[in-house]
């Protein structure tokens, strides 16, 4: 049962996430941030995770707190669902195109948080969503899940395509990393992750 239910309430956001790592890709997303909803739906679908995200945030200020905190809570859900990480592949990577955009994501559920985000976008917004918040989301995820996360936008012009290729590459890399292999070991020379 690789599932998690995580709630987090601050003065800025109230977030509830339910995650099933062994799902079929169904999602129910309501963050109040339309583009983030679209990206989380894509993440669930392409990672084959069942994901429910309910978030209420101070979007009258901007989308920053909601986006970052959803990343943190989603990361915490992965951490809880993975438990001691026994039997997982641990590492995952993907290079995913979307039209002219091409993104590389590599991650390691190592128990150590580190993020490299090498992407810049040609527009400051996609709809009403600030493109700089993509990095905040993934930094939050790495913090919550205690993973090593490397993201590189290799090519692209259209900011929507670029961001969506990043989320899809992340979904496939995460799917690979959480996959169960035919052993019951903790994949570390230390014996703990």
Image (spheres, rainbow, N blue to C red):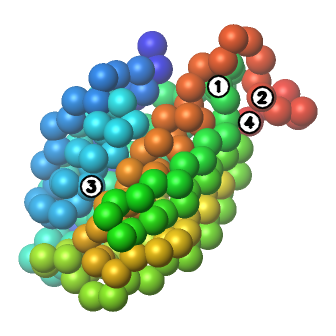
Residue at 32 percent across and 55 percent down: it is 70
187 sits left or right of 95 in the view? right
Q: Which mark is residue 39?
A: 3
Tell me the crowding category of disc 2: few under 14, some 14 to 19, or many 20 or more residues within 10 angstroms, Cα based.
some
Could you tell which of marks 2 and 1 lies nearer the N-terminus? 1
Residue at 76 percent across and 24 percent down: it is 186
Give the CA distance from mark 3 to mark 1.
25 Å
Could you tell which of marks 3 and 1 lies nearer the N-terminus? 3
Q: Residue furthest right?
A: 189
Give the CA distance from mark 3 to mark 4.
28 Å
Residue under circle 1?
A: 88
Residue under circle 2?
A: 187
Q: Position of residue 3 (x, y in %)?
A: 41, 23
Task: Assign the N terminus to one quadrant of the image.
Answer: top left
Could you tell which of marks 4 and 1 lies nearer the N-terminus? 1
- The residue tagged with tag 4: helix, strand or loop? loop
Tell me the crowding category of disc 4: few under 14, some 14 to 19, or many 20 or more residues within 10 angstroms, Cα based.
some
- CB under 8 Å between discs 2 and 1: yes
Could you tell which of marks 2 and 4 lies nearer the N-terminus? 2
Front-most of 110 and 122? 122
Q: Which mark is residue 193?
A: 4
Tell me the crowding category of disc 3: few under 14, some 14 to 19, or many 20 or more residues within 10 angstroms, Cα based.
some
The answer to whether residue 113 shows anywhere in this view is yes
The answer to whether residue 10 shows anywhere in this view is no
């Amino acid at each position: 049962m690789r599932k998690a239910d995580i709630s987090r309430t601050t003065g800025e956001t109230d977030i509830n996430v339910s995650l099933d790592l062994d799902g079929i890709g169904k999602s129910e997303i309501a963050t109040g941030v339309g583009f983030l909803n679209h990206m989380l739906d894509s993440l669930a679908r392409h990672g084959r995770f069942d994901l429910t995200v309910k978030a209420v945030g101070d979007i009258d200020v901007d989308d920053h707190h909601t986006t970052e905190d959803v990343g943190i809570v989603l990361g915490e859900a992965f951490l809880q669902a993975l438990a001691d990480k026994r039997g997982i592949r641990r590492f995952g990577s993907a290079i995913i195109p979307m039209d002219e955009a091409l993104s590389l994501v590599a991650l390691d559920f190592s128990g150590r948080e580190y993020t490299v985000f090498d992407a810049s976008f040609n527009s400051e917004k996609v709809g009403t969503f600030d493109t700089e918040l993509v990095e905040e989301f993934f930094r939050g995820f790495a913090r919550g899940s205690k993973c090593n996360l490397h993201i590189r936008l290799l090519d692209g012009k259209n900011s929507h395509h670029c961001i969506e290729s990043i989320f899809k590459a992340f979904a496939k890399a995460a799917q690979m990393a959480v996959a169960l292999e035919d052993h019951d070991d903790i994949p570390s020379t230390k014996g703990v992750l």
